[in-house]
Image: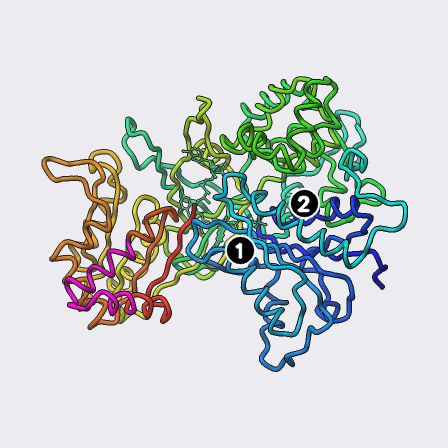
Amino acid sequence: MASERAIRIIYVTETGTARDVGEFIGREAGRYALTASVEDVAGVEPASLATDSRVTVWVVATTGQGEMPTRIRPLWRLLLRKSLPRNALAGHSFAVFALGDSGYRLYNAAGRKLFKRLSQLGAYPVIPRGEGDDQHPHGLDGALHPWLDLLWEHLLLRHPLPPGHTVLTRQELGCPPPRYQLELLPRDAPCASPTERDAVRGAALRIADLGSAKVVSNARLTALDHWQDVRHIELALDPPAAYVPGDVINILPSNTPAMVDAFAELLNLDLDAVVSIEAAPDAPPASTPLAGLVVSLRDLFTHVIDITASPRRYFFELAPWLASDDREVERLTEFASPGGQDELYDYNYRDARWPVEVFTDFPSLRPPLHYLLDMLPLIQPRAYSISSPPDASPATTASITLAVVSYTTKIKTPRHGLASACLAQAEQGARLPVFVSRGAISLPPPQLPMVLVGPGTGIAPFMAFLAARADAHAAAGTTPDLPDMLFFGNRDPAADNLYSAQLAAWEAAGYITVFYAWSRPVSGVPKAYVQDRMREPEPAAALWHLLSSAAGVVYICGSAKKMPGAVKDALVDVATSAGGLARPDAEAWLKSLVKSRRLLEDTWM
Ligand SMILES: Cc1cc2nc3c(=O)[nH]c(=O)nc-3n(C[C@H](O)[C@H](O)[C@H](O)COP(=O)(O)OP(=O)(O)OC[C@H]3O[C@@H](n4cnc5c(N)ncnc54)[C@H](O)[C@@H]3O)c2cc1C
Ligand SMILES: Cc1cc2nc3c(=O)[nH]c(=O)nc-3n(C[C@H](O)[C@H](O)[C@H](O)COP(=O)(O)O)c2cc1C
């Protein structure tokens, strides 16, 4: 049973941030002479919520389009049961820190829903909900630190410090112990095979059904002199996987050899060395998923550890302890302090610095190998909307439409995304660990027409939708009463006219009408975005007819930044101009579309 001076922390994560925050809160608890258990929600015994007398701190990320992370869903279904009495959780004292991104429409929806439901079931919130925002200049920390001040204040009232104790500084708490211990093996020691290594990666990321995919083809869709490299990549799935149009394939990428070599050279690592990774004594199993892996450093830093993710909080918590130069230690200590957050933001987060850049700036910061595993995260999967319909059930192939992420930082460093670099270089025959997951959208019944709005790679799931419908029409020898409408935005028809031949063929067959929006003026036609094309009288009239008389469904896919809001504003304008509705009625109509799931979004940052 819980000891008196103890709290329970439950993290609900999709990509690891909530776990980092939960573990950070757990370490901070030590400063207040509190012990903390830090638990993954998937391992939480539901009955314990009612019986455990400790204050429970929930750290809850939102995923998808305002959804609960996958690992809480079984517990969430239980909590939503109508049969639960109103006082089912009367013994549960809790606090919620929600993790989200205000760029998404359903901001922090998961944390908000959990807070509300726990309260409805009689649980007692000890402090108001905290809401971290990726868009805040200090990232999640902008809201986390003030919220934690409130939490500790409450907990100190509940559990006053024992006589003679004071709140410890982080310095007094000391350097957190490493989670792993590594043994150097002979260079010819047998290592995990790629399959065994990927199984460890999958288990560490809690992916139940990690399969693999072989690259069948990898073709650039944009002109060679166009700034953006967009690719159509066809994959053969091994084993075959069931999916429907709208689903997503998740790819576990690897760092490129050039990146790994540069990293190893800087840190003076022998990439051919072989190590056996074990959990340090007392390290909780949930924090040491790589325990048992025997691997060369080359494979470890190529396939397992993300050497490009911008260093997170724990990196800067450990760094002052692991640097040797006094001035560097002083600066790193400042970064790790609550008062140093502005400086840390300016240095690290604003430009999403890579670890190699930090190690270059702090030459005395050369962590021992076992601490490197604590400082750098595991490579996370990247999601891609599948742009092909399934060829069989389960499907043996899937294609994706990849916009290669490459940019120059404000400090003039050329950069590329991790998966982007890996996939752009993937040659025919290359193997990638993958898994398929449900998307946020799916095809409506065949009789309902669709309005598809998808600039750039937002076209990807629509290619699967349209191909599935075209195949069905071709097989039945039919054409639709009303063609689906596609609003497709790109920059320049000569440079990035993605899938133009296929779209023209479907248009000629009477399956779709395409409204192109080019964001560069083309032969006298002024530039336009998808929302501008939707407002034009002719498309607006067709759109209104399709949505009002034919009960059509609208899909918005692609960038989650400004586009989805601008498209919804355009729909309201269409309802007033073509539908003759007064603005308040047009706004109510849009809300009813969302509520009845006739306006669906699959967008990403
Ligand atoms: C449901 C879903 C479906 C998706 N479908 C597709 C799809 O069909 N096609 C597709 O291409 N992508 C799709 N994505 C996005 C994809 O998952 C990856 O996020 C994307 O490919 C980038 O991954 P990466 O590893 O190359 O970049 P990362 O290594 O993850 O780097 C991306 C990071 O780089 C930084 N960055 C990027 N551009 C700039 C810039 N200009 N200035 C400063 N910093 C910058 C940002 O911090 C950004 O978060 C989808 C995402 C989701 C969630
Ligand atoms: C695919 C994806 C979808 C997201 N959807 C939302 C959302 O709908 N609402 C929101 O507030 N934040 C959303 N976010 C932001 C995350 O909640 C935020 O980045 C959080 O810190 C991630 O925590 P995690 O790493 O523990 O999963 C999304 C992030 C991703 C990658």
Depth order, front residue of 490/325: 325
Image position of 127 (left or right of 593): right
> Which range is magenta?
567-588
Location of residue 493 by image quarter: top left
Q: Which residue is mark 1?
A: 62
| Residue 266 x %, y % | 63, 18
The quarter of the picture showing ligand 1? top left
Q: Residue furthest left?
A: 524
Depth order, front residue of 470/322: 322
- Name the quarter where the C terminus is drawn: top left
- The amino acid sitting under disc 2 is Val
Label 2 Cα crowd, 10 Å radius (few <14 / some 14-19 / many 20+): many
**With respect to residue 400, does 184 lie above or below?**
above
Q: Which residue is mark 2?
A: 200
- The amino acid sitting under disc 1 is Thr
Depth order, front residue of 508/394: 508
Question: In percent of the image, x 35 and y 52: which residue is there?
Answer: 557
